Each structure stands twice: as structure tokens, then as C-alpha cells.
Amino acid sequence: MAVLKIFPDKDATLYSLFPNMNTGLDEIVEATETVFAYSDPNPQTSRFLIHFADEDLAAAIDLIPQSLFNSGSTTSTGSWNAKLQCFIATATGLAVTTSIDCFPLAQYWDMGTGRYLDEPISTDGCSWIWAGYSGSTVWQTSNPPSGASSSYTSSVPAGGGVWYTGSQYTSSVTFSYRTNKDINLDVTNTIKAWTTSSGTIPTTIIDNYGFILKQRLEFVDNKNYQPELKYFSVDTNTIYPPALQISWNDFSFNTGSNNTQTILNTLPATITLAQNPGVFYSESINRFRINARPEYPIQLWTTSSVYLNNYYLPTASYYAIKDLETNEYIIDFDPIYTKLSADSTSSYFDMYMNFLQPERYYTVLIQSTINGSTIVFNDQYYFKVING
């Protein structure tokens, strides 16, 4: 199975309260509702923008076979999918439920180099009013492209972005009060509309201007409704920048003419990770192989040790990747996209190192259902990714 991530080349937050302020280098992006701000008695909102470079998207999509790309779906049987991920920094003032909507932007924008409440404020990039630097190009709210829209109230300046509203492009998530506030939105249809898998991007349904994320309920004139959802930006100094995770189903269980290896069906078992030198450059693609055998193999009269016999793991076997320091899943077990393949040599999976944050250690976990029991093997399968 194949899973990789690409990271944004720019992001920024648009604030209705500060209509000319650019925040292109801020460490936080946010979708926040504010009532009775010190400088304006009217309800205010903020929305954030995220963009992924065309060349990064093309490089990722080119790894997916054309037939799989064309069949991409948001259902559980889809051959590939794309998930927009944002990681929560702060969440306060939430209602019982709070919803975030995500749309593809319909207009180009400049990131700028500002930060929140710089003194003086920076105006060299996008803001609530301007898609470019202040005084250049406004958001086209009065004459949006076909199929696009915007929203704001009469109490704030016109602006806040322009986005496509087709149901095929709209993604949303609703948080209850106690649920995890990380964003993990299926944006497969939008990525398909932006890209082809031909090595370039010669034709598109819509242009790639990135995403806009906003709260569903905005400009609510109620001091008891002021939800704040703040996420780490691409400029964060943490390991939690936004990402686009692309996964595709390349499962293959084809052992060829190898009739000497059997599928492991005995517990306890010994599982080791082969072809793991321990250190990888971020440009590496590595095929990890799985050595598996019963912990106590049946003793036979043979000319070689039974401990050298390798077994295939059952088809209900998956891998996951964790950050060794934080113990958080970078790739979680997935019944479609992290399923172990097998060839004439062994069970295996491929890992694209460029989606992992460099200069960090990671650990591999193997989950397998053997003889009716689901076991997770975690025997210090460590590796590190370094800058090339």
C-alpha cells in the first residue's frame, strides 16, 4: 500500500476585523468568531487559506496508476483518496457542535510576509479585502468566476475570499464539544479537478488556488457564541504543519512460483523488519520486508534450521508509522491503504520518506490477524529520516 504527504507552499488567515492585515508568515491559521471586539461592536470572523504547489501535486499524482486515478472515490472501496489535514493548536469557546467547511478557492492570492498584529501591520500580501498586496487586486466578490461565490455581511468590508460552491467540491467536519479538533477532510474530488496523472497539469476542471476553511456559522451577534479554532500553519516551529495525505491501493499478493513459504497461522510469532538500514534521506523510497515465523516452530529432521524458514503474513495485515518521541500516529492502520503486499520473497510495504518530517525518529508497527487473534507487533522497528 502507498501513503505519502505533501506540505503547503503557503497559507494565511483573513480577518474581517483587520481588513488590510496580512498574516502570511504567522505560525497559526484560524477560523474564529468574535463578538464585541474592542475596536468594533459588530460580529467578526476569520478564515484561513492553504495552497499546495502544482509541481508537488503532479509529482504525487504521477505515482498513482492512471486507471486508479480515474477511479478515485470518497467511498471505502475507493482506489485512492486525498485528505486535507490540519492540527489543532488551541480550541476555546466551542458550542455543543461547531462545523468547519472547506472549499476550493476561485482566485489567486499572495501569501505575504506579515504576522498577526504586527506593528505596523504588514500589507504586502492577501488580507480580508485584498487577494494581493493592499492596493492591488481585491477579492472578486462582486463578480466571481462562474460557479464561485463569497459571503460577508454589510457590517464588514467586502472580501474574505472567493470559492467554488459545487457539492462535489465541498468538504466539512462537525466537532462535538469533546471530540478531537484536528481536521482530516476528504478532498479527493477537488484534487482530481486540479490535476491529471500525465506528468504535467495541462488540463484542469478548475485552477488550483488552494483551499479556504471557514466556520459554517459566521457573524453571529451573540456574545455566548465565540468559538475559536486555531491550527498550526506551515510556518510552525512544531512537527504539526498542515498536510495533504494521498493514499492509493496498490495491494498485491502474488507469490509467483514460490511454493515453499506458507502463510503464518501460529501464535506466538516472531516478526522482524528487514531492509531497514536505520537512516534514510528524505528523497528515499524504501521497501520494508517482513520476516515472520512461529516463535516455536515444529521441529523437523532437516538439513537446515527451521528457524530460517520465512512465512507470509495473512492478507489481513497492515502497517502503521508513529513518531517515536510524541508516540503519535503519522500513518494509522488502514484496511485499504496500509495493507501489506507479498511477492515471491516475503510480505512487504513501500515507504515514501519525503512525507515524513526530517531529523526525527519513527517506529513501524505491524498489525496482523493470525488464527482468529489480532496482534500488534512493535519490536523496536526504528528508523530516522534526515535531510539530503
Image: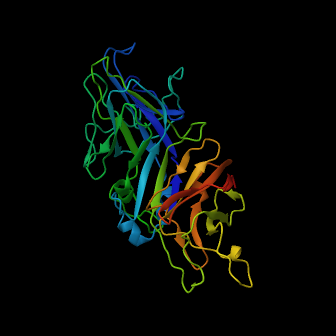
Viewer-closest of 131 and 361: 361
Determine the residue located farthest toward the bottom in the rendered image.
257
Quadrant into which the C terminus falls: bottom right
How far across and how far down the image is residue 151, in percent?
27, 34
How far across and how far down the image is residue 143, in percent?
25, 41
- Can residue 164 be seen here? The reply is yes
Q: Is residue 211 above or below residue 271?
A: above
Total numbered badges shown on the rendered structure: 0
- Can residue 127 be seen here? The reply is no
How far across and how far down the image is residue 271, in percent?
63, 64
How far across and how far down the image is residue 362, in percent?
64, 51
Residue 27 position by quadrant: top right
Viewer-closest of 223 and 58: 223
Viewer-closest of 230 and 201: 230
Q: Relative to residue 188, is residue 291 drawn left or right?
A: right
Q: Relative to residue 147, is residue 23 drawn left or right?
A: right
- What residue lies at 43% left-to-right and 37% top-to-bottom? 180
Q: Is residue 311 above or below residue 241?
A: below
Q: Relative to residue 305, is residue 343 drawn left or right?
A: left
Residue 269 position by quadrant: bottom right
Viewer-closest of 197 and 379: 379
- What residue lies at 61% left-to-right and 56% top-to-bottom? 364
